[in-house]
Amino acid sequence: MDWTDERMDDLASRMDAGFDRTDHDIRDLRSEIAALREEMHDGFAAVRKEMGDQFGQLHGAMLRGMIALIVGLLGVLAALVGVVATLALGG
């Protein structure tokens, strides 16, 4: 089997076409990766915002709960003081 100039040119053409397809595929993959990266960035930003909102609501609920607990404890303390004062005054 001899390698004639025509066969060498044909081989070179096929190799060039293969490299062109590979270059095209790599460019497509790079653009898909860039789009995916942007989509992920936007998605994570939305999740962070939503989580921040949720934590803000949780913080408010916990604060209201602590205030209610303190008010309740002060009420119990006032009732105990009243009972002790009543008993001490001769009740």
Image: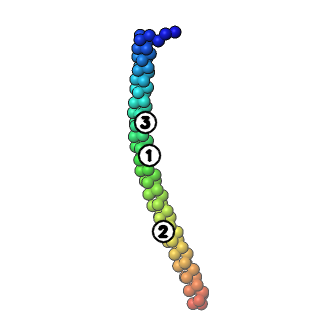
Question: What residue is disc 3 on?
Answer: 33
Question: What residue is disc 1 on?
Answer: 44
Q: Residue at x 39, y 40 (%)?
A: 38
Q: Amino acid at mark 1?
A: Phe
Q: Where does residue 21 sit, x and y in percent of width and height?
A: 42, 23
Q: Amino acid at mark 3?
A: Ile
Q: Nearer the viewer, residue 6 or 87?
A: 6
Is label 1 in a helix, a strand or a loop?
A: helix
Q: What is the distance, in whole Å, between disc 3 and disc 2 at their CAs?
A: 50 Å
Question: What residue is disc 2 on?
Answer: 67
Mark 1 in CB contact with mark 2 (< 8 angstroms): no
User: Along the polypeptide, which appears first: circle 3 or circle 2?
Assistant: 3
Coloring basis for residues: rainbow
Q: What is the distance, in whole Å, between disc 1 and disc 2 at their CAs?
A: 34 Å
> How many discs appear?
3
Q: Residue at x 40, y 23 (%)?
A: 20
Q: What is the distance, in whole Å, between disc 3 and disc 1 at their CAs?
A: 16 Å
Q: Nearer the viewer, mark 3 or mark 1?
A: 3
Label 3 crowd bin: few (<14), some (14–19), many (20+), radius 10 Å: few
Q: Residue at x 46, y 52 (%)?
A: 51
Residue 21 seen by the camera: no
Q: Nearer the viewer, mark 3 or mark 2?
A: 3
Q: Where does residue 89 sit, x and y in percent of width and height?
A: 57, 90
Q: Where does residue 62 sit, x and y in percent of width and height?
A: 49, 62
